[in-house]
Amino acid sequence: MMVMVPRIAAVSYLNTIPFIYGIEHANNLRAELLLTPPALCAENFAAGKADIALLPAAVFPSLKSVELLPDYCIGAAGPVRTVVVVSTEPIERAERIYLDAHSRTSVQLTGWLAAHRWKIAPEWYTLTDYEQVNRPRPGDAFLLIGDKVFDYEDRFPYVYDLAAEWRQATGLPFAFAVWVARKGTPYEVTDALAEALTFGVERTYEAILHYGYDRKPYDAYDYLTRNIDFLFDHEKHKALQKFWDSGIKITPRVNPG
């Protein structure tokens, strides 16, 4: 018998639908789901609105009294496809990078790649008006994440996949989001969550059909099985430790327009 009905904050993107499907359909877990973009997930968790959350990996070191849950993450062993920097020019010419306001981990990963792989020191701005992506100026590059990337991926001559770039630089996979629980969350709840996530990942195609992603112009199943790697294995732990230890902190300015 469940000792509590956990409040679970998760991300409202295609790459989480196996998790969401499992939470909603596995018989062993009753939970309240709160679905938002990644950055808001972290805010909801920090504000005490959730007991368990799928959080941007970049925020984990700053959290107090939480535990990292094993087994699952939103990761990539190769190109992730939906976390990219796009530009009309080679990245070495980027003077300004506009950073998707929906992301935390991807912002810091872009900063890491700028410093360690691309060897550039651009100005950083928050991207809030996505129309701006349609009228880039010379020297502009844009970090885009999530399902909207499918709409932009063929529009730019230069597309830098952040997971692929990280892999080239480090030889490691990457984990963009991790599951965390507040310390003291009962084991019955975290065990039930792990079972529900397994249930969902094993039924990825059913999840695609259930949420209508079979009617999209892109191949959702190919993306979820080829680009996304849900297993939080030793290599992804190692990658995150390297990422956290780097101490990169990008704080974008508000776009002056």
Image (cartoon, rainbow, N blue to C red):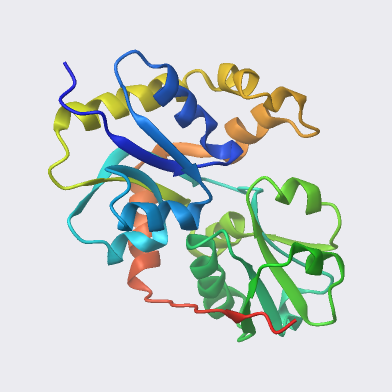
Please count the marks in the image. Answer: 0
Between 5 and 190, the residue placed more toward the observer is: 5
Q: Is residue 246 above or below residue 193?
A: below
Instruction: Where is residue 181? Give x, y as percent.
Output: 25, 44
Q: Residue furthest top?
A: 27
Q: Between residue 240 and residue 213, name the one nearer to us.
A: 213
Horizontally, residue 256 falls left or right of residue 248, namely right
- Residue 140, above or below 41: below
Question: Which quarter of the figure is the N terminus placed in?
Answer: top left
Q: Nearer the viewer, residue 8 or 81?
A: 8
Q: Is residue 242 above or below residue 18?
A: below
**Percent x, y for residue 112?**
50, 73
Which residue does the image show at 48% across and 45% down from the upper left? Answer: 75
Residue 6 in which image quadrant: top left
Residue 153 showing in the rendered view: no
Instruction: In this rendered view, identify the residue nearer to me: 205 or 35.
Output: 35
Q: Left or right: 32 with respect to 217?
A: left
Q: Position of residue 124 (x, y in %)?
A: 61, 81
Q: Residue visible at 19% across and 28% down?
A: 4
Tell me if residue 168 can be seen: yes
